[in-house]
Image (spheres, rainbow, N blue to C red):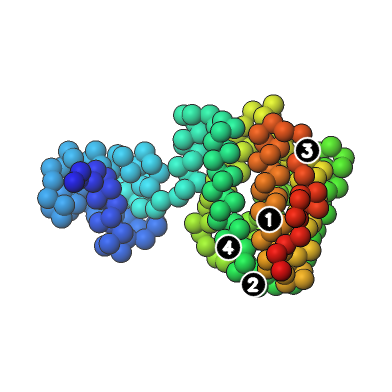
Amino acid sequence: MTQEPLFVRLAHFLRGAGVEPGDTIPSESALTRRLGVGRQQIREALSALEALGALRSRRGSGRVWIGFDLHTYVLRALSLAPPTPDMVQGLLEVRQALETSFLSLAVTTLDAEHRHRLRELADGMVERANAGRSFSDLDRIFHLTLAEPLNNPVLEGILTVFWQVFDALPETDVFIAEDPKIAAMHGYIVDAIEQQDVKRAVHELDAHFYGVKTRFAGGSHPPSPRDLQGATAPE
């Protein structure tokens, strides 16, 4: 079995030792003793963690543990390799699987304030799309609002990562966020949520992703849930 890289072992050690974001980590000599490796190896592992953004050197007070932040890693990766439509397609597949799975729980936890916010965002997207303007920022807030009551940082992180990648695409590739039919799909999701119809809400969200992927693949306007054959949610 391949041994984990030392920087991974070091990260596990720090978390296991109860080091929290903002804490100063042990000295190089202390880490050398605890992990049983040479000082140069420890320095290389620390440098790797700093490069990933998990550590920050602070003059006069050692190194501070920042922790692992998915957003930071993605931004660093985007600076090295520009995103592609294929990358966004892959993230859409992940989002569809996660969001449709979690929505059944979210529907029952979204309070009146959340539902009102979702309705305003859905209406705002339709208004912008009808005017030929992008609603990308409202779309991002809409989906994050759906996930907010779940208090799941991994799900929220993946959603945020998607938008970081999407927004980094060349403008010539971003044409979904002005589509009136895609904008209208958000209203159908809110309709189902307001009726506490879990099956319908999941169906409408799934249809929304189908429409986005169809449009992103270069097709014409995607069918709305009302246009899809058998669009009525199962009883």
x, y percentage for residue 2?
A: 20, 43
- Distance from Cα at disc 4 to Cα at disc 2: 11 Å
- Distance from Cα at disc 2 to Cα at disc 1: 17 Å
- Distance from Cα at disc 3 to Cα at disc 2: 33 Å
Disc 2 residue type (three-letter): Thr
- Distance from Cα at disc 1 to Cα at disc 4: 11 Å
Which residue lies under the disc numbered 2?
A: 109
Query: Which mark lies nearer to you, 3 or 4?
Result: 3
Q: Residue at x 46, y 35 (%)?
A: 77
CB contact under 8 Å: marks 4 and 2? no
Q: Earlier in the sequence, mark 1 or mark 3?
A: 1
CB contact under 8 Å: marks 2 and 1? no
Q: Secondary structure at mark 1?
A: helix
Left or right: residue 12 compared with residue 227: left
Question: Within 10 Å of the Cα at label 2, are there few (<14), some (14-19), or many (20+) other Cα atoms?
Answer: some
Disc 3 residue type (three-letter): His
